[in-house]
Amino acid sequence: MFGKMKRLLIGRPRKSAELEAEKLGKLKALAILSSDALSSVAYGTEQILIVLVAAGFTALWYSLPIAVAVLALLAILIVSYRQTIFAYPTGGGAYIVAKDNLGKISSLVAGGSLLVDYILTVAVSSSAGTDAITSAFPALHDYRVTIALSMIVILTILNLRGVTESASILAVPIYLFVVAIFVLIVCGIIKYFTVGAAAAHAEFGSVVSSVSLFLLLKAFSSGCSALTGVEAVSNAIPNFKEPAPKNAAKTLMMMGIILGAMFSGITLLAYWFGISPESKSTVVSQIAEATFGRGVMYFIVQGVTAVILFLAANTAYSAFPLLSFMLAKDKYMPHMFMVRGDRLGFSNGILFLSVLSALLVIVFHGNTEMLIPLYAVGVFIPFTLSQAGMMVRWIRLKPQGWMVKLFINTVGMLTTLIITLIFIFTKFQQVWVAFIFLPFVVYLFYKIRVHYDNTADQLRIDLRNEKPITKGNTVIIPISGITRVVLNTVSYAKTLSDNVVAVYIGFDDESIQKMEQKWAEWDPGIRLVVLKSRYRSIMRPLYKFIQTVEWKIAAEDHVTILIPQFITKHWWENVLHNQTSIMMRAFFIRNKEVIVTTVPFHLDR
């Protein structure tokens, strides 16, 4: 039943040879890898206004120069990451750049930050998408967490089906969002210049005494949340069709142009229409209402905005599994993240991402504003490390035109470093968790690497000098009676060794006597050892017996315990049986001198 359900939801397994067909063209890649960045239009301007409104309505005009500064930073990042794409065409982004140029610790900080950022991306996107729905339908406000979790489940299933299939499905609503926002911007501009705004806006350039440099920096750092997701294209170059670097670079440029235009338009309309942030209505919702009223176009804009906010999480579903694969290949994450699933995607990474992001949504009750600062600081640390790594690369290699490239990455590094510091100082109360969690993640990476190194050291052999040692085999079969299961096990044991012993543990003289009589009557050709347990324990007397045998024969023989176990026809019937055999296996498997094997006997009915 589980297999049929899996095939229905995920589809048929794909051959490894079909991997090339999973590569993305520019249009599909733009939809999948840019959905996070493009969706930030829905809350980037709002985050600026939330900070400025604390100084009063008049201070909202500062959103315009702050937006210009955010756009300048976007241009710097686009140009910088374009250089990264051509320098590191295998993908991996900040992790690979830092690993190659800055060393192990910096690469793990970058990798850990990105992994945390992708988890937060899914949580923030699903929460923000829910906000858009509840703005249009306030009655759903109490079901925010349930709606967000439902969307995470849908995205998980889509991504388990494969990159190409999810791209084909998700590209349509993403491009509908882009079209809807541009229609909103154009119609909003026309309405402002023909009809005017219903509400007065703050006068541009007016002096506001309550505005401080700290407040402006805090608003700027909040607006920089619109830049999260810019790095995703450079991380996922292997997902592109050939020539992958050129296609990735073109996709990155298209994303930058579209994002810059939409962010500019929304910020300008918010200022012209005198929009201020509200708890139950997003800025985009208010702009759409001011432009179209509560008509069909309003609900179309809200609908596609909600969809794109949900689908923004898909950027993380594309990048998180790839980055996990690279970390696992370097032995900093479990090897299971290197395994491709039935549909050729890294399904373990997809499932791990979904579970952790769902937990965040539950813990934060779907509150987007609480998650965004963590989300943004998680991406600006890798931004800074990536730029610094590229600077070191140009100085070290000195390729043709390296001075210009060095200048671009230096400007990028200084800018993102300043933004990171602004985030830390202006939003410390909201981002302090990152300074506990991030070192813990890096420590976890180190512990995983140490484990794999230790395991490799212990498993490695000297091919010239270390050869298999031939020894005998003493087989011990714990039994509770004479049944077909025991017959099956004894028959198998006699093919392994001539030295087979059955062990029966009795709790009283009567049960022991009956067992000895039955065994003598059956006479299977192996010796029966009977032990009496005064405290009704099976493990302790059996353990002492095995220790004694091991002590006597360890030099000449292996000691093998064959545990009889029958397999029921239905999974739920297994609850009624086999508890003792499972306990024996768990208990004796820890003894490094003993081989433990289960011999199954299948029941037909």
Image (spheres, rainbow, N blue to C red):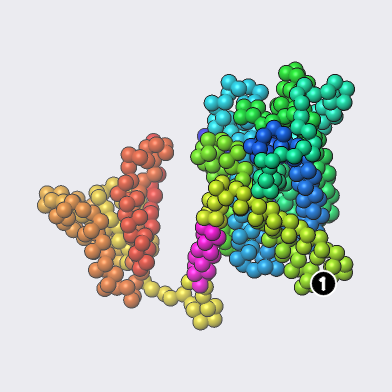
In reply to whether residue 451 is colored magenta, the answer given is: yes
Q: In the rendering, at what x and y percent does residue 412 appear?
A: 76, 58
- Residue 567's place in the image compared with 98, above or below, is above
The count of marks equals 1
Nearest the viewer among 86 and 294 is: 294
Residue extent of the magenta highlight: 439-457
Q: Amino acid at mark 1?
A: Lys
Residue 546, quarter of the rendered image: bottom left
Residue lying at 39% horizontally and 44% vertically, measured from the top left: 567
Residue 154 shows in the view: no
Q: Quadrant of residue 88?
A: bottom right
* Left or right: 161, with 541 as reference point: right
Vertical placement of residue 67 versus 88, above or below: above
Q: Which residue ends up furthest to the bottom in the rendered image?
A: 465
Q: Nearer the viewer, residue 222 or 129?
A: 222
Q: Position of residue 454 (x, y in %)?
A: 49, 69
Q: Residue at x 43, y 76 (%)?
A: 469
Write the residue at 34% across / 64% down.
Answer: 591
Quadrant of the rendering where the C terminus is positioned: top left
Crowding around mark 1 (Cα neighbors within 10 Å: few <14, some 14 to 19, many 20+) is few
Which residue is the site of mark 1?
Answer: 398
The answer to whether residue 394 shows anywhere in this view is yes
By secondary structure, the bulk of the magenta-drawn segment is best described as helix
